[in-house]
Amino acid sequence: MKKLLIIGLLALVTQNLSAQNFTRRDSLHGGLRFERNCFDVQRYDLNIKINPEERSIVGFNDITFKVVAPTKKIQLDLFDNMKVDSIVWNNQNLQYKRDFDAVFISFPKDLAKDSTEKVRFYYSGNPKVAKNAPWDGGFVFKKDSNGKDFIAVAVQGTGASLWYPVKDSQTDEPDNGASIKVAVPNGLMNVSNGRFLKKEAVGEDYTRWDWEVKNPINNYTITVNIADYIHIHDELGDLDLDYYVLRENREKAIEHFKADVKPMMECFQTKFGQYPFAEDGYKLVETPYLGMEHQSAVAYGNKYKKGYLGRDLSGTGEGMNFDFIIIHETGHEWFGNSVTSKDIADMWIHEGFTTYSETVFIECEKGYEAAMKYINGQSRNVQNDKPIIGQFGVNNEGSGDMYYKGALLLNTLRHVVNNDNKWWSILLKYSNTFKKKIIDTQTVIDFFNKETGRNLTPIFNQYLKYTTIPKLEIKGYKKRFQYRWVTDEPNFEMPVDIMIGDRKVRLNATNEWQKAGELITNYNDIKVLTNHFFIQSNLQ
């Protein structure tokens, strides 16, 4: 079951609201009150019709849930610009009250603990249109080169309730999967998550496409993709690889996907464990926006280019050896879709590990030196503007440094461990231990502390909770030298490697000045290995 209760979170939210200028809407979206915690979602069955001309949705979501605590009221969510048509339970229309995007539903009697219930939530309206997906949430309505509709949606961070009624919290995923049934005008196809079941006519002008998800699924990764698609099928062992691309791009897609997908899957399955959602297959689906990690239906819009729309974000040249969107967004199948953070304040658990997966792929393909070149090139993108961890309970992400700084933290930890066999074993165990589970930062720290046999807590804290990175200070002391860390985190301790001439020396540095055991004749002989550790030094 992918569900966690956060004890005392409401008190934390109340404490932070005024200081951070968060609103009631933020706390309704991001917080966990009794009306959310009293039930555990078991399944979503979404059945809708999308009218491209009107840019509208009409339909319903059957929401099956188990009652965790007796209650007469639950909270579901739907953006307030969308209309609630009715909510039905046991053939009765239920009363409800809207508070911003929250919909508080009242039942005529207490729902018994451990009972399984189902509500049918009818709704309609014109969902928000994204201005710049996927960086803002909403639908994208475009046309292909033949003038046919090309439509998709991305809502990470903004919230799945932008377009369908849902318990809009990462703390609870439907244990028994979901079905997504979407009717679209004849001549178009809808591709959603999971396995294709069937299509059937809906009246004279529409065809409904039915998809089934077997696994628990993040609500923000449930998706629709509408276009004149053609289907390309491939396999890697027992794993189905399916590609849905615009008809005009068929030949281009076959060649382009061949270069990266199978090598990527072989690499990731070696390093992170078996593909987590084999029952639902793996799909790349062409979209009118750049990309998104929609579970088992990865959104692809990188225009069949290497790098990031033809650019190398690392500035090293290594990023031009692969299609960034294929590698990064598929990495999320392990980190984000399988291992999930319970609050988006901890989204570094998704983005840091996934950004690191790009480096892992390069190492699989080209070796260690190319991987180090790439990840250190990414350091130029770190802003150190605000902490990586955001505010909890108010739907608030931390700094965008969760991507590159998060990956560089992991590269630093690799070199703290100083044993690659052990490092890869730990990373694989991490992915498998928390497969299809919802966790938080403390869980990550506790795991790495245990598996490394080290107290890494101050290291995690410095990189995640502050805007600065550790600074190694070295100063002269006769023929020996002294060294220490300068950090915001108190009692900071982290080993670091330096070169003295052609000799590598490990310093077990703390916040206190220590005398080195090594004799030196020239301070120019000291080189701090900042390519192994994401740090500053007064010698660099």
Image (spheres, rainbow, N blue to C red):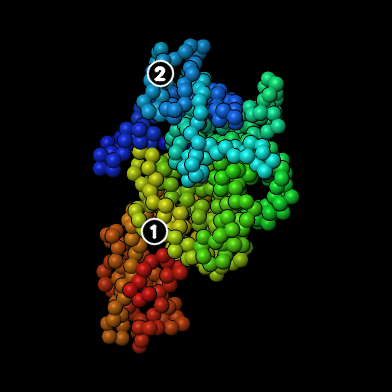
Q: Is residue 197 visible?
A: yes
Indicate which disc, 2 or 1, sits on the residue closer to the N terminus: 2
User: Viewer-proximal residue, 204 or 78?
Assistant: 204
The quadrant holding residue 308 is bottom right
With respect to residue 38, does 247 lie above or below? below
Question: In this view, which residue lies farthest toward the bottom?
Answer: 521
**Which residue corresponds to mark 1?**
383
Numbered label attached to residue 96: 2
Q: Is residue 281 visible?
A: no
Residue at screen point 57% across, 52% down? 325
Residue at screen point 42% across, 52% down? 400
Report x, y in % for residue 528: 40, 74
Please state, as top left, top right, bottom left or bottom right, where the C terminus lies in the image.
bottom left
With respect to residue 350, does 497 lie above or below? below
Horizontal relation, residue 357 to residue 67: left or right: right
Task: Identify the amino acid type marked 1.
Answer: Gln
User: Viewer-proximal residue, 243 or 85?
Assistant: 85
Report x, y in % for residue 159: 45, 36
Instruction: Give neighbour class at mark 2: few <14, some 14-19, many 20+ (Cα, 10 Å).
Output: some
Task: Identify the amino acid type marked 2.
Answer: Tyr
Report x, y in % for residue 24: 32, 32
